[in-house]
Amino acid sequence: MFTIKETTADSLIALRWQVLRPGRPESAAHFAEDAAEGSAHFAALDINGVVIGCASVIKKNNALQLRGMATAPEWQGKGVGSAVLAATQAYALRQGLLLWCNARVSAVGFYQKSGWHTEGEPFDVAESGPHVVMRFSSESC
Ligand SMILES: CC(C)(COP(=O)(O)OP(=O)(O)OC[C@H]1O[C@@H](n2cnc3c(N)ncnc32)[C@H](O)[C@@H]1OP(=O)(O)O)[C@@H](O)C(=O)NCCC(=O)NCCS
């Protein structure tokens, strides 16, 4: 059982750090644009209100970049990530903005199941490994 809500970046830092930036300083889990106008943050909460899933969208050049997509290890494979992702997709549709991300190659299948498509060739990101640009298209869902 979990619920999805729009929230603050601050409430997502611990999960981002644990899942996406392990072994690095806590500051690596903060994004420069977290508080920027047009940014929005989404959490999945368990029945105790603990954040078990997260994602953020950052407005750049009239599009939204998805960042910080993560599910707590013990909750992975239970629909949390796709529910958080759906909240970001709905937000982008309401805003009328394109939604894209630099996806870890290891997570491409996760995004594809929600109607995302890769664009171009994979590239390396320092300390995070291979990534590829992906874009959400509501027409494919
Ligand atoms: C990728 C991640 C966010 C997925 O979250 P999740 O809560 O486990 O995903 P869900 O349970 O909602 O999975 C939805 C579907 O995607 C599939 N899926 C999940 N992760 C996948 C992956 N890495 N590759 C391929 N398919 C995947 C699931 O099997 C499920 O398929 P189904 O609908 O046929 O059952 C999570 O595994 C995670 O935090 N990984 C580590 C951090 C990471 O890689 N983040 C993405 C950075 S770009």
Image (tube, rainbow, N blue to C red):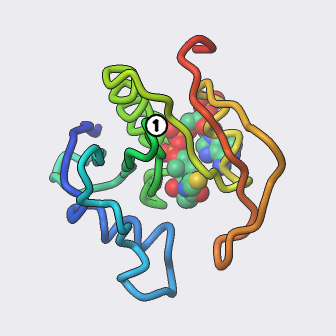
Task: Tell me the element at label 1.
Answer: strand
The percent position of residue 51, horizontal first and vertical second, equals 27, 56
Residue 125 image-quadrant placement: bottom right
Residue 92 image-quadrant placement: top left
Residue 77 in sight:
no
Q: How many marks?
A: 1
| Residue toward you, 79 or 67 | 67
| Residue toward you, 124 or 61 | 61
| Residue toward you, 84 or 58 | 58
**Quadrant occupied by the N terminus:** top left
Mark 1 near ligand 1 (CB under 8 Å)?
Answer: no
**Quadrant occupied by the C terminus:** top right
Residue at the image position 26 percent from the left and 56 percent from the top: 36
Residue at the image position 21 percent from the left and 41 percent from the top: 6
Residue type, numbered disc 1: Ala
The percent position of residue 52, horizontal first and vertical second, equals 34, 54
Residue positioned most to the right: 121
Residue 33 image-quadrant placement: bottom left
Circle 1 packing at 10 Å, graded few (<14), some (14-19), many (20+), is some
Residue positioned most to the front: 61
Residue picked out by circle 1:
63
**Would residue 21 appear left or right of 133 to someone viewing this image?**
left
The percent position of residue 48, horizontal first and vertical second, equals 16, 52
**Would residue 105 appear left or right of 35 to someone viewing this image?**
right
Residue 21 in sight:
yes
- Relative to 103, residue 18 above or below: below
Residue at the image position 16 percent from the left and 52 percent from the top: 49
The percent position of residue 126, horizontal first and vertical second, equals 67, 77
- Relative to 125, residue 131 above or below: above
Ligand 1 quadrant in view: top right
Residue positioned most to the left: 48
